[in-house]
Image (cartoon, helix red, strand yellow):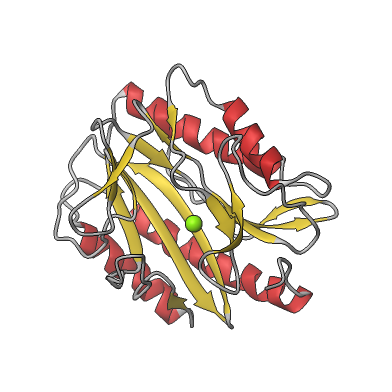
């Protein structure tokens, strides 16, 4: 499958990304102590459906064949990604909650995520969220014509104080648009990945995941939720962008999460 999109397809992703961003911002604005994951998921779903889109994670199958049950992945504290968004679990003051969301609009899909403080969080958690967001933007800045996906991983790695944070290596960013996950892999570190060249109209999701401890991960009994092995906290931020001759264009404007 081609690694690039037509201009019309990029336009569709620009529209989809704008709608996705509104859906995520609406959910972010509803984050507070006492709200449940399922309530946040319902809020985001309504914005997508009212806007003519379709949630792209709902029904998505992973290796276990178990279809994903919600619009968003909602992952709290030591949960890194892929937490089930239909859980009747209440958020508490001081939690950090990752909200990862994707949609289809006009035949193309987009993908984005933020990690949000619930009320007032401690300074270690605040620093984790800022470091993860900064690492994502370091990767975005490296997403230029002539670089490869490895330059993105290198830029992310260089932006992170590895004495303080683990970089999750078992999960990486990816191409996006025709499918929820497509080629190429977009790593968050220097690793043995194919050095795919970045060219105009390539659409990728950049999504570093950091922990306050080890980078070891494990999958929960539900077959989806990925957590840190050592129970340390995790942060996750993600954008979908298109490579252009004038630099990266973010297709999923980041919501304000108040950090
Ligand atoms: Mg993604």
Q: Is residue 115 left or right of residue 182?
A: left
Furthest residue to the top? 163
Compared to 202, does 9 lie above or below?
Answer: below
Compared to 95, does 131 lie above or below?
Answer: above
Where residue 69 appears, as percent x and y from the top left, is 27, 71
Viewport quadrant of the C terminus: top left
* Quadrant position of residue 205: bottom right
Where residue 73 appears, as percent x and y from the top left, is 34, 58
Observer-nearest of 76 and 95: 76
Observer-nearest of 221 and 192: 192
Compared to 72, does 236 lie above or below?
Answer: above
Image point 45% across, 47% down: which residue?
171
Where residue 97 appears, as percent x and y from the top left, is 31, 45
Q: Is residue 250 left or right of residue 50?
A: right
* Quadrant position of residue 124: top left
Viewport quadrant of the N terminus: bottom right
Camera sees residue 207: yes
Where residue 6 appears, as percent x and y from the top left, is 76, 75
Observer-nearest of 17 and 257: 17
Q: How many marks?
A: 0
* Quadrant position of residue 30: bottom left
Image point 45% across, 16% down: which residue?
163
Image point 38% across, 29% down: which residue?
126
Camera sees residue 253: no
Furthest residue to the front? 192
Observer-nearest of 35 and 140: 140
């Amino acid at each position: 499958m081609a690694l690039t999109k037509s201009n019309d397809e990029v336009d569709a992703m620009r529209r989809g990304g704008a709608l996705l961003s509104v859906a995520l911002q609406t959910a972010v604005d509803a984050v507070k102590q006492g709200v449940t994951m399922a309530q946040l998921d319902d809020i985001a779903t309504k914005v997508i459906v009212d806007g003519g889109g379709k949630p792209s994670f709902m029904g998505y199958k992973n290796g276990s064949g178990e279809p994903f049950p919600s619009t968003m992945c909602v992952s709290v504290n030591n949960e890194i990604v892929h937490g089930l968004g239909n859980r009747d679990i209440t958020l508490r003051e001081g939690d950090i909650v990752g909200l990862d969301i994707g949609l289809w609009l006009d035949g193309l899909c987009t993908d984005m995520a933020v990690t949000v403080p619930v009320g007032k969080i401690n300074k270690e958690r605040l620093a984790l969220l800022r470091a993860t967001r900064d690492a994502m933007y370091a990767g975005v800045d490296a997403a230029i014509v002539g670089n490869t996906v490895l330059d993105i991983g290198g830029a992310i790695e260089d932006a992170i104080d590895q004495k303080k944070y683990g970089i999750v290596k078992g999960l990486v960013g990816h191409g996006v648009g025709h499918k929820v996950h497509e080629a190429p892999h977009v790593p968050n570190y220097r690793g043995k990945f194919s050095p795919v060249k970045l060219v105009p109209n390539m659409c990728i999701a950049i999504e570093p995941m950091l922990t306050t401890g080890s980078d070891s991960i494990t999958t929960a009994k539900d077959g989806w939720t990925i957590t840190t092995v050592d129970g340390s906290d995790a942060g996750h931020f993600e954008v979908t962008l298109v490579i252009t001759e004038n630099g990266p264009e973010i297709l999923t404007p980041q919501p304000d999460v108040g950090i």
